[in-house]
Image (cartoon, coloured by chain):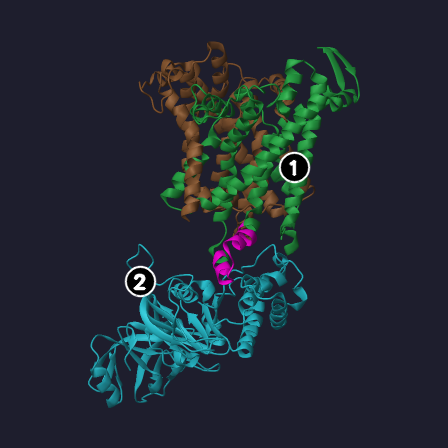
Chain colours: A brown, B cyan, C green
Amino acid sequence: MKKRSFGLILYLIFAILPIYWMVNMSLKTNEEITGALSLWPQHLTFDNFRTILTDPAWYGGYINSLIYVLINTVLSVAVALPAAYAFSRYEFLGDKHLFFWLLTNRMSPPAVFLLPFFQLYSSINLFDTHIAVALAHMLFNVPLAVWILEGFMSGVPREIDETAYIDGYSFPRFFIRIFIPLISAGIGVTAFFCFMFSWVELLLARTLTSVEAKPIVAIMTRTVSAAGMDWGVLAAAGVLTIVPGALVIYFVRNYIAKGFAMGRV
Amino acid sequence: MASIELNGLGHRYPGSSDYALQPQTMRWEDGGAYALLGPSGCGKTTLLNIISGLLIPSEGRVLFDGRDVTTLPTEQRNIAQVFQFPVIYDTMTVFDNLAFPLRNRKLPESEVRSRVAEIAEILDLSSELKRRASGLSAEDKQRISLGRGLVRKDVAAVLFDEPLTVIDPHVKWLLRRQLKRIHHQLKLSLIYVTHDQIEALTFADQVVVMYQGQVVQMGTPQDLFEAPAHTFVGHFIGSPGMNLLPCELNGDSIRVGEQSLAIPPALAQQLAQVSGPLTLGVRPEFVRCAAEGELASLHARVLRLEDLGTSKLLTVQLGAHQLKVKLGEHAELPGEQVQLALQPERTMFYAAERRVA
Amino acid sequence: MKTYNNKAWLLVLPVVLCVAFSAIVPLMTVVNYSVQDILGPDQKVFVGTEWFKLVMRDPELHEALGRQILFSAAVLAIEIPLGILLALALPAQGWRSSLALVLLAMPLLIPQNVVGTIWQIYGRGDIGLAGAALNGLGLDYNYTGDSMDAWLTVLVMDIWHWTPLIALLAFAGLRAIPEAYYQAARIDGASRLAVFRFIQLPKLRGVLLIGLLLRFMDSFMIYTEPFVLTGGGPGNATTFLSQYLTQKAVGQFDLGPAAAFSLIYFLIILLACFVFYSLLQNAGPTEKAEH
């Protein structure tokens, strides 16, 4: 028992140190960063954060990122819910193939696919909109959402559906009133994964936006290359990208701790 | 095989000030078939887990054949336990499942094989031995769980925690009969936890009734039916349960509401010793319609008569209380009013829920 | 038992439409590129399988593929066992569990290029803690100069970033195992190792399949993190498939071969995923067998 906790603590230190180092840097001036190495800020400064939080070009990026991530999460879960129900309750023509096809959409290497994506979204006038990024991210989030939700739904006994139909519930009413509350933990976990994969993605988000919907991740790469290495601001921007994620984990931790098994297809 | 003694055994879960199991002392004989009966949350599973060693009690001792095993870990106790949901090792065959407890104890493979064959024969699993256990039906899986308990030669007792919950009703009785047969064949001590009285009464020689963390009566099914030691036993067992009427001792008779019922002087003397309010208990089966003017009878107003097929159930109003009476299949009622006679030797008296006479 | 009902397609339809919208047109476009020589906006020549042949003969591609396979194999071989160990070590409940979960999951929610940036700084000998510490210990560590150091840094970075995913999935899988299984195992006298081998591992099959596939796909397509960290160097030491492909497509403007390369790349991932998927599906009990 002791040995296991020791190993865990060791790993957690390994996990946290790089993040700590970035936080540490974000609170230093550039002179201090490039000067002698210090484990904590000798001249504590919030200037780096102030730069970001007062410049619309910076903080607008966070807002853009949050908008498309949230749209993506809501849409992914919304379309995945009925599909996952279908996979968990019915057999139908081509179900196995369909499921694997969905999964293959996570597998297209981005580099060359970026150009057709750009062309596609430009041709329907969605280029540089939040919805474009949200839709593009659905490509890899929806298959995963279907998979996770299906696992949770399979754990709900079919008798519940049958009883509800006998009691005269229509399918939509049953689904929204009875079924969705039963798998709320699954929805929480799915939303977490959708949020995560959409939040961290860079290539598609950068390709499909230019000004209006430009995400923070893209702003970071461009600003840095243009202005040389402003380490302090870069670190502060990085620290701020972790904050929404940390909040999300905090809210779903109990759903994860409740457990899920995923005995799919 | 062993007798099991519980010595002042009680348990409080950490962080709780209430007893999940009230401290108590009792003895379970070697080779008996016991049923542990009670409603959900009465402490049955806690007691079972303490016997099997999955839980260490907060006070008291557990003795197997006089040997203190209170803090002995499960695997050294020679106890087998079958759970509510079948527990099988998915990736193994039926044979490997049954052999698992023996192989863990490093028995020679030849002995493993002969033991497994023997148990599979008893449980009708011989033809399934090579199959993967995960592909079987719920009752076969439960048979495997049972088999893993029986396969060990040294088991002192087999504990069942509501093992038939997930089994289809039409195979329940088959499995139960198989269990009884195994009990006779192997002379094992069995402890069977259930909240279903029919299951308990048909399975066990001795039924242990639990209520609010306490064993309120241990006895044969007949004892529980004819002489419940606690109002809970009277009320929980039987369908419908015992009629319970508040009453008062008044010299040589009992007052029930406005009416008076004569009782033998010896009983009256006995009841006079008791302090606190009295309750009269009588099962619907031991009440009959009396002739007009018969002595020691109570007057009541008919509320309804239900036909239960092989019997009829009469509900009457007696003062402020309702009373159930079981009548024969062809019983007819004289009218709106009836006289009821209670079978004296089956009429019980309770004070503070415990039987006093 | 599932019922056979083709009306279920109606429920799947929104997903199919959403995904098809973003999937089919780009895929067809790439297929289109791969069989043509694009000389200008309106000048295209059909070349058949010419680009495929060219790409298959490219020795640099073979090297990049080799590096990629080695990298993905190392990622899976380390992250999956490590993730399972972490999940086993995590406290089951209480504030310790919450705290450990939140700390553990933190790297998961950091954008890819920020991950690259963090490690770029962290590993530097002058301003980074890890780089300075390693140099302080007398090791000649320099990820921008030494191929081996660069490759290992990318690997450690990936482990740091993604092991928590496996750990979270495995943790959730472990929490879903009913207590009765552990109790039965104790009664059966099973050792700790037997409990892991015969109860925990089989019950984790579902979540580990997801974890394995996700890690395989994502590590096989890794691009941003090593690009930010090392830019593919020194030399070609950390130029993995995606980056080589980008060099082809963007750097050298060879759209045709790059598209052919993309499709081959895609098929390799598809094939590998299909093999993993089928193996793991058949490794354990399936729903089908029960009926």
Judging from the image, mark 2 belongs to the subunit labelled B
Residue B317 in sight in this render: no
Q: Position of residue A202 (x, y in %)?
A: 53, 23
Left or right of residue B154, residue A244 in this image: left
Disc number at residue B19? 2
Q: Position of residue B94 (x, y in %)?
A: 62, 62
Residue located at (60% from left, 17% from top): A122
* Magenta stretch holds residue C185: yes
Q: Is residue B169 above or below residue C275?
A: below
Residue B305: quarter of image: bottom left
Left or right of residue C90, residue B323 in this image: left
Q: Is residue A230 above or below residue B41?
A: above
Which range of residues does the magenta coloring cover? Answer: C182-200
Q: Tell if the residue under mark 2 belongs to the same chain as the one under mark 1.
A: no
What secondary structure do most residues of the magenta stretch adopt? helix
Q: CA distance from mark 2 to mark 1?
A: 54 Å
Between residue A100 and residue C277, name the one nearer to us.
C277
Between residue B312 and residue B49, name the one nearer to us.
B49
Q: Residues within 10 Å of mark 2 (few under 14, many from 20)?
A: some
Disc number at residue C128? none
**Furthest residue in direction front, as rendered:** C138
Judging from the image, mark 1 belongs to the subunit labelled C
* Magenta stretch holds residue C205: no
Secondary structure state at the residue bearing disc 1 = helix
Left or right of residue B341, residue C34 in this image: right
Q: Position of residue B268 (x, y in %)?
A: 23, 86
Q: Which residue is mark 1?
A: C273
Residue B112 in sight in this render: yes
